[in-house]
Image (cartoon, coloured by chain):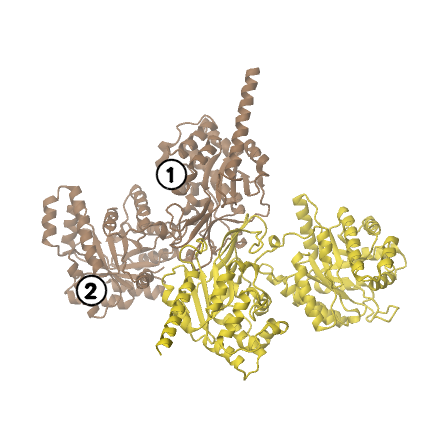
Chain colours: A yellow, B brown
Amino acid sequence: MKIIDRIKKQEEKNKKQKKFEAFFSFEFFPPKTTTRIESLYEKIERLIELYPLYIDVTWGAGGSTSEKTLEIATKTQKFLGIETMLHLTCSNMTKEKVDKALSQAKQNGIQNILALRGDPPQGDKEFKAIDSSFQHAIDLVKYIKSSYGDYFGIAVAGYPEGHSEAKSYEEDLQHLKEKVDAGGDFIITQMFFDTNIFLKFVQDCRNIGITCPIIPGIMIVADYAGFKKMADFTKMSVQKEITDKLEKIKDDKVAVTNFGVEVAIDMCKKLINSEVPGLHFYTLNRDNVTKILEGLELIQNCRSRREYPWRKSAHPKRKDENVRPIFWKNNSQGYIHLTDDWEYFPKHFWNTKVQKQQYKEITEDYLKKFYRIEKYEKDLPESINSTEDVSKFFVDYYEGKKDFLPWTLKPLGIGNLIIKEKLLLLSKLGLFVINSQPRINEALSTDDAVGFGGFGGFIYQKRYIEFFISLEKMNILFKYMDQFPNITYHAVNHDGTKIFTNNPENQTTTVCWGAFGCGEIKQPLIVDPICFQTVWKNESFGIWTNVFGQHYQKDSTSFKILQDIHDNYFLMNIIDHDFVTPSQVGRSVWRLFLLLEKELSNENENENENEKQI
Amino acid sequence: MKIIDRIKKQEEKNKKQKKFEAFFSFEFFPPKTTTRIESLYEKIERLIELYPLYIDVTWGAGGSTSEKTLEIATKTQKFLGIETMLHLTCSNMTKEKVDKALSQAKQNGIQNILALRGDPPQGDKEFKAIDSSFQHAIDLVKYIKSSYGDYFGIAVAGYPEGHSEAKSYEEDLQHLKEKVDAGGDFIITQMFFDTNIFLKFVQDCRNIGITCPIIPGIMIVADYAGFKKMADFTKMSVQKEITDKLEKIKDDKVAVTNFGVEVAIDMCKKLINSEVPGLHFYTLNRDNVTKILEGLELIQNCRSRREYPWRKSAHPKRKDENVRPIFWKNNSQGYIHLTDDWEYFPKHFWNTKVQKQQYKEITEDYLKKFYRIEKYEKDLPESINSTEDVSKFFVDYYEGKKDFLPWTLKPLGIGNLIIKEKLLLLSKLGLFVINSQPRINEALSTDDAVGFGGFGGFIYQKRYIEFFISLEKMNILFKYMDQFPNITYHAVNHDGTKIFTNNPENQTTTVCWGAFGCGEIKQPLIVDPICFQTVWKNESFGIWTNVFGQHYQKDSTSFKILQDIHDNYFLMNIIDHDFVTPSQVGRSVWRLFLLLEKELSNENENENENEKQI
């Protein structure tokens, strides 16, 4: 979606609520090393939970890190689902490079470009364009418009104190108007410290007929040297009290950071009082922006802002997608990748048309890319000598002693905490639970644990448990299954040669839904038996050997045990359709496992008896 | 759907339930007068609530009532939604007539034909075919197969005692086998009284290789003369104890009827014990079959057999339709007619694709055909002298003193009884309620009043009220509307020039849904604001003048008052999205009307005060 349309939506919302609310956005730059990129992703994942309107990623000067820019923007747009704007400079680029960047951006669903001229490469003081047709940012704006029509939303840069290379402030303003007239949707300004300068700049823009939104760019001072360098380079005015204070505390890093936050809060408050539409933060890849937003009370209840229980991709072709299988609850990026080629994304309900779509194949590469256990490796058992050791690993996870399973890569989610004890029981019985959700009846849509879809709705969930189980134990479950008319199960072995189910017509079942005000019932999570028996079966079995197993030597006992589970266990899921009756009463699925526990402990007793007799 | 497929489904169900259950079906003949046809429809509507597997309509001998046969079958198949089989005879028909009948049947969604030779026209004793290529029923079977391929399901007639014109029982059996081999899906037998004869017949059929289902045809004796004529004509054996008993009571009609029921129950019990797949009743357009089914305990909880809150059409093109607007809750046949041309019927949810489909126009003819108030006319006010008289008419309806409104044509439904008092209040306030439903939270899907969709589900409804209201009173409602964030309303005047709503994007809202075991959430009833403002507005306003108004002279005061309401009132609907909170608590829509009541009574007091002062 174009950012300008998001800005307009926010304006409409403000009008409707009769209450002014500024949006905010974050700017990041591409780090140079893979490790730093990984850690940036984690930071971005945390920061987008604050619900910025969009983020943007700068373009490496001279294109040095330009490939990384595209890689990061693709990941955030398509996989993390946050509207991402790509910076693009032109003067230091050949036309071919510009073309390649734009077409790749389009292909990955990126719809917003900040069109810039670009600074001279480091070292060079004077500016020299590589391609004579790309002298100024306006050339890039015009080029995007002529080559891509209305596909891209375009932002342009404004200089509240005039561009350092411009002949005069007035001439610079005129250039800005030309950029807007050529197709710029809105303006993001260069950083400044004096809000009066910004407000005068806005007034000057309005006076010469620039009517589009003008978003102030906010620099958060975090270290003295950086601040000094930037201030010199941009020649911006900084109030004496700020420079004096910074001079005084320049060697105390913590004091500088705190002061930076304080200054930013002060500036932002003034800007919000003047009703700027939004605030654009130059984060410098730091996360101190959180403190500023807290200070401005701009962090809202996140759950009520979640549209669905999963994060939506921001790729335009997936814009109306609103239902997904529950299997990928812990790996939404994997699901987006696997379905990337789909021509049709399900809306409102999951139908046979969807069941017939082709997923990408589950390859070793796919598993390694989407289940990166490297950083958790120290938490894996050093060696595995029996399936009991595997069981112990799952017990540790559900007891909260470990923060990940190879299938989840994160601690047990808040939505599952209330059934923690039950999942622990299953682990102790040697059932390896890799996905689950409790029954929810009539929770508020703003509920911290399970809410989604905004205010005023009610949320429902059916109990769902998915686990690996040995044939012997599964047969015990089957013995009692007739007592549970409210249960549907599906089970499959690693190569799909054995399938057990009481859902022979492979009906898809909704396991999470919500009733809201206007609108139809939302049904964002389903269980699709076909998908379970094929692609998801491949993925979850593959993790035993290709992810978990990678930690061990191929010829080790540890690996052989994992291989044995892979070869002989079943992946089983159970849906309990009675979301109304509390589990203390009646025939909830948990009672089924209590029956299993009882039968297993009887067996043990019998064994002990036998031993005694011997 | 082909009846043979329904029979197979029943067989599968029996297998799955490990419990034998026989289906049943009803045969009707086309009456000769319009009044009798109307009364047959009412009878059929009642009888199909017993959930027969299908019904069939006989073909007038010599084609005398053949047009009526088609008219009745179309109505029952398409509008009443019961699978209907058309009898078709050939020997007394030209090829053109046969062709016309088959093509009309197909056009109206009829998919089942009972292929018969046909009896000689009354008076003629000997048989003579009109078209030489249609000598026998088998010719018709072959003709249907060659001309329509697999479209039609075909039943053929079997004669447990041999056809009266056949050379021998064995030859007749051989003819039957040929009919089945030529394409007959199943056999319905001629009537008989001795079940041993039927069972022997079945065995004889099996012995010569007839494997399809054989359904016994059950005659219910209801008058002596008819029985005698039929027995003579078909030359069937009747046990001596039956003829003796009938001889004895032949002048006591009630005794004959009771005995007929008794005999049938006795026969059916024997047949069910022999596990016949189903029972086909020759009803002779009487409804005493109900007593037989009661005697056999074959009448089940009807609510649990309702697939949706509305009756589905049995036209094959509508087979997957599962959502409709709530507006036509009282006129499902009108809705089927209006949407007859649609190429796409909504499944699972109501979408913009549906919003854009064209409905047929609401004409005077349409209104007269689908709102037949003739038989209720005596209940209409003799004359109307003020809108208070109209109000009184609505009050009478909601007090249960009248059994119909021109918009409903039936008493207040069981689903609305719990809000009767509230609807009465609205009528007293001069709001003319024409459609409504109470809030339902978590009702069982087998609930008598609101259940649907079979066992094991939970049903939900949002409060919905639809009424005509004057502008003044609507303005009072608007004054308080801000206090009710849980309410969405739409209002429109007769020509659509004035529209008021707090749903400016015209979002469709689900107002009835159900969560079941396997499967997605069912959402069978919605409110579509576009449809409300256009076609439904035309229909419901049209009733004031073209249905209600038809009872009065055009130049009468009565008519003028109805015309005035038509011209100046608004049609308004209100959806209360809070289906969770009971109405005693919080801000249910009913409180809005209490506020209106209070304000109106204040006005009255003020008026009275003013009068005093004068």
Query: Going 19% across and 57% down the picture, which residue do you hit?
Result: B270
Query: Going 88% across and 69% down the picture, which residue do you hit?
Result: A125
Location of residue B345 with respect to A375 vertically, above or below: above
Asked if labels 2 and 1 share a chain, the reply is yes
Q: Residue B411 shows which numbered tag?
A: 1
Q: Residue furthest right?
A: A167
Quadrant for residue B206, please give it. bottom left
Mark 2–mark 1 CB contact (< 8 Å): no
Please state which of residues B432 and B374 is positioned toward the viewer in this rendering: B432
Q: Position of residue A135 (x, y in %)?
A: 83, 66
Q: Residue A260 shows which numbered tag?
A: none
Location of residue A235 with respect to B371 vertically, above or below: below
Q: Position of residue B446 (x, y in %)?
A: 37, 50
Q: Is residue A483 left or right of residue A220?
A: left
**Residue A161 shows up from this direction:** no
Numbered label tally: 2
Q: Callout 1: helix, strand or loop? A: loop
Amino acid type, residue under disc 2 in the picture: Val
Residue count near mark 2 (Cα–Cα under 10 Å), binned few <14, some 14–19, many ≥20: many
Query: Going 52% across and 43% down the picture, which residue do you hit?
Result: B576
Give whichever of discs 2 and 1 has the lower sequence position: 2
| Residue that label 2 marks | B202
Please state which of residues B217 and A277 is positioned toward the viewer in this rendering: A277
Q: Callout 2: helix, strand or loop? A: helix
Chain holding disc 2: B
Q: Is residue A277 left or right of residue B266?
A: right
Please state which of residues A299 and B452 is positioned toward the viewer in this rendering: A299
